[in-house]
Structure formats: C-alpha cells, structure tokens
Image (spheres, helix red, strand yellow):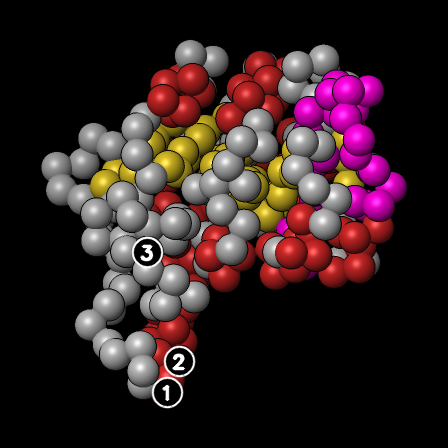
Amino acid sequence: MCTTCGCGGDGARIEGAAHGHHHDHDHGHSHAEDSRTIALELDILAKNNAYAAENRSFFAERGILALNLVSSPGSGKTALLVKTIGMLGGRLKSYVVEGDQQTSNDADRIRATGAPAVQINTGRGCHLDAHMVGHAVERLAPSEGSVVFIENVGNLVCPAAFDLGEAHKVAILSVTEGEDKPLKYPDMFAASDLVLLNKSDLLPHLDFDVAETIANARKVNPSVKVLQVSARSGEGMEAWIAWLTAARGMALAGHPLGTAAE
C-alpha cells in the first residue's frame, strides 16, 4: 500500500484547477508501528471507497460506462486509446481522464482525436484515487450514455487497491512484456474483467508465448476475458469495440437512454 511504498499524493494536480487536489494520505506515521500502518491503510481505503461510491452513483445516474485502464509503463495504452476513440467515432461519445506523474503529453494526444480530456498529474503518486477522478469528471461533465476512459498511471501495483468508481478494470499487457506478468502482479489481474494483449503485430518478431500468458492470467482470475489487439495493425480491435458496446449496453440498462441504445 502507499503508506509504505514511498509515494506521495501531496503534489497531485488536476489540469486547469487553480489549486492541486490532495490525497487524504497521512504520511506522518512511523513505519515501525505495524498496527498504526494497517490502521492508516484501512482509513485511506475507506475514504477512497466513499469517493468511489459517489463516482459510481454519478455514472449510474447518467448511464455512463466508466473504465479504469491499467498497465505497466510502455504497454501502448495511449496509442490503443487513440485508436479506440477513432473507431468509435460518432457511435459513442468518449471522454478521458489521463493520469501521469508528470507532463500532459498523453492528454494532448487524446485531445487531437477530438475527445475531451482532463490531465491529472500525480507528482510522486503512483496511482489515481477516486477523489482525484471525481474532480476530473466534474471538469469533463460527460454526457449521458457516454464512455469515460480513465487512463491510470503506468503501474500494476498500487492502482489495484484503489476503486475509482469504474464499471470495469481493463488491464493492458504488451507482448513485449513477460508471460509471467499476471503471476507477478496477481492483485491487478484478479481485479480486471478484461485483459487486452496489445502490440500483437509484433508477435512474429518476438519469442512470446500467448497461450502461456493467457493461462497465467486465468490462474489468478479464471473468469477473465483476454483479447489480442494491435493499435498499429487494427488486429482484434473490432472484438474490443464489441466488448465496449456490450459493456455500454449494461451501463444503460434501466436508464431512459437504454430504450434508444444500439
């Protein structure tokens, strides 16, 4: 947990805001006091989960599909998201919350697609939390029946513990990473409903065992769905869009817009 890993959220800043929004993390404890550390971790998660519940209610009331995209750095998340937004076109309005420790480069790439995006720079923080996301979504003001993509900070550890109010976590795993990634980071893969095995166009040039990777993912999460995709070649992207469309239908279930859904 982030009370012990050394990250800090005190420098978190949401783009365009007059002042940074702060974590509720309390970093003033002694790491030698195990019971105190556990109490702080539980307090942090309890506060986060309360904000996540507010976010979830906001999305549900508006029939919005919210997805938490998680991965290691360099998985190709942003390129995949740019391709996805382009393929969705006018079929589904997309909004993006972009999380990075520094820079707004990825948010700029998203905006070039025409999709509204808000950048959250977490400073030393290694994950987004529900409080930050709530403020970013307020700024985005997503329309009813839309999709909100939350591109988390590149890290497969801390984001696993923080519910953002999303409907699904989607883990992006590049074929340039190891087959054992799901076993090394079981909490994240156990929490994800879908794994996108990205950069599949590179498979002919790599010694990478797809079947082994899928088997490892299912060791920690037997029900996880895995799709091979390539933002560069377009391979598998239609299956990903179909999954998105079905998930959006679930988000609209019981919502007035659901009667007009595709």
Work out which quarter of the rendered image holds the C terminus and state it.
top right
Q: Look at the numbered disc 1 and give the secondary structure of its residue.
A: helix
**Sequence-first tag of 2 and 3:** 3
Observer-side mark, 2 or 3, equals 3
Task: Judge the density around disc 3: few (<14), some (14-19), many (≥20) Cα neighbours within 10 Å.
Answer: some
Work out which quarter of the rendered image holds the N terminus and state it.
bottom left
Residue bearing mark 1:
35
Q: Is residue 91 above or below residue 69?
A: above
Q: Look at the numbered disc 3 and give the secondary structure of its residue.
A: loop
Q: Is residue 236 above or below residue 258?
A: above
Q: Amino acid at mark 3?
A: Cys
On the image, the x and y values in percent for residue 43 come to 35, 75
The answer to whether residue 65 is visible is: yes
Q: Is residue 257 left or right of residue 118?
A: right
Q: Which mark is residue 164?
A: none
On the image, the x and y values in percent for residue 195 come to 70, 42
Q: Which mark is residue 38?
A: 2
Residue drawn at x 66%, y 37% as measured from the top left: 177
Q: Is residue 150 above or below residue 181?
A: above
Q: Is residue 184 left or right of residue 5?
A: right
Q: Is residue 148 above or below residue 158?
A: above
Q: CA distance from mark 2 to mark 3?
A: 16 Å
Q: Which residues are magenta?
A: 190-214
On the image, the x and y values in percent for residue 86 come to 58, 14
Residue 87 sits inside the magenta stretch: no
Residue bearing mark 3:
7
Say which of 47 and 1 sits in front. 1
